[in-house]
Amino acid sequence: MSLRRPNKRILILCEGVTEKLYATSLRAELGRNLQRSIAVEVTQGDQQNPLDLVREAIAKKKKARKEKNPYDDIWIFFDHDNWPQLRDAFRLIETEGFRFSFTALCLEHWFILHFEECGRAFQRGEDALSHLRRLWPQYHKTKLNHFVELKEKLPLAMERATRMNSRQEENTVTERNPYCTIPDLISFFQSLEAG
């Protein structure tokens, strides 16, 4: 009996543990039949800086092609964290045709949008974390299933992110703060469900 190969293969390469947990929760939301026909590989990168993360994705892409099992889509899931090589990372993402799920300045800003309209440009991740803890006292970076906990507020957060992003359209991606494209990753998963 031969093993059936998935119809689609997707890689989501995550900067950190929180991003990986969030992407894993998105994958778990896919229906059972879809989980059998679509292989979504969620992994945490060996390096945490965006440029090395993109380079790692390129290596995984080449290896998958060599093994004749290429990825249909590759996502890089990361935040700003004031990385100096952010501009180079975005250039390489565009060159490779990868997709990205990104927040400036940190992932916690995405969680804040579930609670309030927040167009504040945080300068440090600690500031956003402190703000989030006032809104969501039980927040913990790795001990919660953030997606499940905030799922009922997701449509509102996506609307808020869209409005927030539209105020920053004149700037390049690396200069936008606040900015969040996590709704793009969520919409991608929703499109998989829709067929």
Image (cartoon, rainbow, N blue to C red):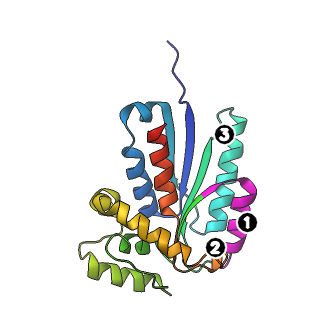
Magenta span includes 176: no
As shown in the figure, which amino acid type bears the numbered disc 2? Val
Q: Main secondary structure of the magenta part?
A: helix
The residue depicted at 66 percent of the width and 39 percent of the height is 64
Magenta span includes 91: yes
What residue does disc 3 label? 64
As shown in the figure, which amino acid type bears the numbered disc 3? Ala
Alpha carbon distance from label 3 to label 1: 22 Å
Alpha carbon distance from label 3 to label 2: 29 Å
Mark number displayed over residue 77: none
Q: Quadrant for residue 56, please give it.
A: bottom right
The residue depicted at 51 percent of the width and 45 percent of the height is 41
Outermost residue toward the top in this view: 1
What residue does disc 1 label? 91
Please tell me whether mark 2 sits on a helix, a strand or a loop.
Answer: helix
- Mark 1 surroundings within 10 Å by alpha-carbon count, few (fewer than 14), some (14 through 19), many (20 or more): few
As shown in the figure, which amino acid type bears the numbered disc 1? Arg
Give left or right: position of 47 versus 138: right
For this rendering, which residue is in front, 96 or 43? 96
Q: Which residues are magenta?
A: 84-99
**Image depth: mark 3 or mark 1 in front:** 1
Q: Residue 2: percent from the left, percent from the top?
A: 52, 15
What residue does disc 2 label? 173
Looking at the image, residue 34 lies above or below residue 124: above
**Image depth: mark 3 or mark 2 in front:** 2
Residue contact between numbered discs 3 and 2, judged by CB atoms under 8 Å: no
